[in-house]
Image (cartoon, grey):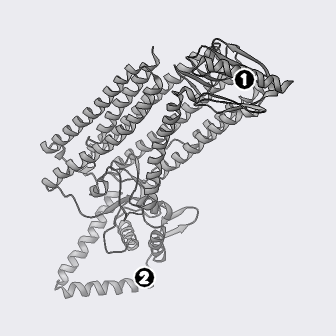
Amino acid sequence: MNSALILLIIFSLCGVLFYFVGCISAGWHNNIILETTIPKGEDQNPKVKAVTKLYKKRLLQTHAGFILLYLFLFFWQNENEIIITYLILLMFQIMMTCLLQIWGIRKMHAVKQEESWFIGEKHEIIMDTKLVLEKNQDLVPFKWLLLIFVISLLTSILAYFPARRMADVIPLGALTLLIFIISFFTYLLVKKMPAKVLSEDKKVNQYCINVTRKTWSKFILALDVFLYLIILFNLALFWGIAHAVVLVNSGILVLTGFLLLYIFYIFLKMLHQRDTALASTKEVFFADDDYFWRYGIYMNPEDPRIMVPDRVGMNISVNIGRPLGKMIMSATVIMLFTIIILCIIPLAQSGNPEAFELDLGNNTLELNAPLTSSTTLDYSKIKKIVLLDSVPDMNMRINGAATDSISTGYFLNKKNEKVKLFVWNHSKKVIAIYTNKMTFYYSNQSDMKIKQKYQELKESVNKKVN
Amino acid sequence: MLLKIDMSSSEPIYTQIRDQIILGIAAGELRLGESLPSVRQFAEDVGINMMTVSKGYNLLKEEGYIEIDRRNGAKVKKKIASDPVFKEQAQKKLRLLLAELAVHELTPFEIQQIGEEILSEFQTKKERGE
């Protein structure tokens, strides 16, 4: 299948996902619809129903519009341009989703005011002493996370043996450690999440909290197992099990699909279990703190808490009313947009053939290409230079990029040797530089320029050798 | 037991904690010897300062309702006995309360009735809890 088509299917599915996630807040959960507290039974009120229907319609129109735009991208046929445009559109899609939610909240709040539904003015926090003590009884034990970490660490050590190089262990070991640190802090956050008292029924409260903690810890565990399997797949490269390339790649793809489905399944199940349990209780507690949730995120300068449970009590939110909360939120938003922009810049560069450089110095040459690190080679280390008509077939890419236009970064060739490519795929000539350790391939947009560079390089090397 | 902390109330939070825990013990919502959240857990869950919780807990400890252990956290005492000092202090408080009721022209019968109603409410809750 065309790789551009696969990308567009993934982007469209993400759009569908955006729609369904957006619809969750328009549902009736613990007396709250669109971040607005509504008296029990009033979810069937025609005005409330009209607002939720309109909100869902606008959500559908917005995301369907974006999906259509993504489908139009198919006619471009250039992967880089498709990804860049998608990332830009994605930023707009995120912004539109947030704006739409604020619009929905305002509409629902207007209904509340029209109907004079003021549930209470007290800012009261209810706490169950027993629930606080037993809130983590169904949390998956930490030892499981520790076990996955130890197995991952031992697995990454296996990367040492094929080439007997510590340098091969470091990336996998560092990745393992990073994953462990992230999952450790997420686990801690879930563990410390306040035990929200949802109803007068203590058994229901305990049930809801157990279901929530269990789901969240399962989610962390599933993510860890997934990342461990990715490490395992990477290890296959070090051991040179390259004939399993397709199997490894499709394995990762299938695994990602399964993981996403599993995460959705456990979270939707949790929501359903909680809603069913709460529906059976006589009285559901809620604080009339809609004002603090008017932007869909908690903002209360009077509340000293930085992390607060969300309206439904199944998630955690940041209090942007506090200076630290503001800092956390801005850092997250800046990080998200920086990641997107950092992805766009090299991608935009990769579409530019001018970015493929071979600079000849007095003693060394420097190779540069998008989406990979630069390489400096000493002329004395070069064994042979050959001008080829094309890059030999590769078994697989280790890192860098492999699109229709460019092949950059480390690859395994048919003999399972590690080689490094700085190649513009549309060129008819390629310079192969052989050293004792590795072979490098270089090309740019002009065959003339490649031939010229080849001559200059040969002269420089010969001069140095003589 | 369910503790309701009113953040907008003029009554200090530590006295709200103290009063509600005593009411909880009387009504059997908190059993003798039952564990309470630690100061840190309490503060983190409600979102208040640890010093505030600590102040409330220390008051309860001084008055003989709870015991605080560094290892085991806070617990309701297994036996809450009344000593002569407590009786004297309680009598003082009751005197002031009865004075207030008398000033508001409540008859001795009405006062007695209120007292009996509250005590029977504690008893009923206790029995239901058991």
Kindly indicate whether the residue at mark 1 contacts the one at mark 2 (C-beta within 8 angstroms).
Answer: no
Q: Amino acid at mark 1?
A: Glu
Q: Chain of mark 2?
A: B
Q: Within the image, what quadrant is residue A442 found in?
A: top right
Q: Relative to B96, say whether B118 is above or below.
A: above
Q: Chain of mark 1?
A: A
Apparent side of residue A263 relative to residue A275 in the rendered image (left or right): right
Task: Tell me which residue sits at (35%, 51%) in the image.
Answer: A297
Q: Dot 2 surroundings within 10 Å: few (below 14), some, or many (20 or more)?
A: few
Residue, disc 2: B86
Q: Within the image, what quadrant is residue A434 found in?
A: top right
Distance in Å between CA atoms under marks 2 and 1: 101 Å
Q: Give the camera-side residue of A130 and A60.
A: A60
Q: Within the image, what quadrant is residue A417 found in?
A: top right
Q: Relative to A114, say whether A86 is above or below.
A: above
Is residue A357 visible to us here? yes
Residue, disc 1: A456
User: In the rendering, at what x and y percent does residue A273 appear?
Assistant: 34, 38
Q: Give the camera-side residue of A194 and A394.
A: A394
